[in-house]
Image (spheres, rainbow, N blue to C red):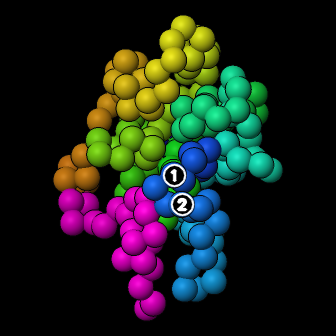
Amino acid sequence: MQGIGRILGAVLAGGRSSRFGTDKALARLTDGRMLIDHVTASLSPHVAALVICGRSGGLADRPRPDMGPLGGLNAALHHALAHGFAGVLTTGCDMPVYPEALPAALIGPDAAIVQDQPLLGWWPASLAPDLDTHLDCQDDRSIRRWAIAIGARLITLRNLDLANLDLPNINRPEDLAAWDRPA
């Protein structure tokens, strides 16, 4: 990570929460904080600045609204490029845990994603024009397929000695209830 430069953190929060039934980012946990508060708190220690993408008050999806995580990533990449960040560490608004060892495994000269959690990723800011081209040329908004298309490295938690780590992805109310156990 040394020598990479300033890193922007981006919480990709532009999904529809269809499986959750309401806006999951705003779901309150037993500690009184919203899910998105847990997400930002877990990513913040790893970045110089943080943005929320794809929702009111944050960076708007690019090139148009309702693009989902890939539109949020595109907005974050352009923000990073315009503000002198080397790249973007991403997470989803429904992923309240960001392991301490993850940035060192992800950050490098090329893009990288966690194999089973593609919203956990590293994206050099220089990819902004490439993502514009991708979104202009096709309607494929899968972040996983775009990562594969650009040759992103796939990081496995097993290789980080994190194979037993619980990386919750809160998609349904029962996922939140199972993760949100009072201490």
Q: Quadrant of the C terminus?
A: bottom left
Choose between 93 and 101: the one closer to the eye: 93
Amino acid carrying label 1: it is Ser
Whether the magenta-drawn stretch holds residue 164 is answered as: yes
Above or below, 43 relative to 86: below
Choose between 4 and 9: the one closer to the eye: 9
Residue 137 at x, y = what percent?
54, 8
**In the image, is 141 to the left or to the right of 159?**
right
Residue 98 visible in the displayed image: no
Q: Residue at x 70, y 26 (%)?
A: 64
**In the image, is 125 to the left or to the right of 154?**
right
Q: CA distance from mark 2 to mark 1?
A: 5 Å
Asked if disc 2 and disc 1 are in contact, CB closer than 8 Å, the reply is: yes
Residue 153 at x, y = what percent?
32, 31
Outermost right residue: 57
Amino acid carrying label 2: it is Gly
Label 1: how many Cα within 10 Å (few below 14, some 14–19, many 20+): few
Q: Residue at x 24, y 46 (%)?
A: 156
**In the image, is 162 to the left or to the right of 111?**
left
Q: Which residue is mark 1?
A: 18
Residue 10 at x, y = what percent?
61, 46
Label 2: how many Cα within 10 Å (few below 14, some 14–19, many 20+): few
Q: Main secondary structure of the magenta part?
A: loop
Q: Residue at x 51, y 12 (%)?
A: 138
SS at circle 1: loop
SS at circle 2: loop
| Residue 57: mark in rendering | none
Residue 90 visible in the displayed image: yes
Whether the magenta-drawn stretch holds residue 12 is answered as: no
| Residue 21: mark in rendering | 2
Above or below, 98 relative to 57: below
Write the start and end of the magenta stretch as one range.
Answer: 162-183
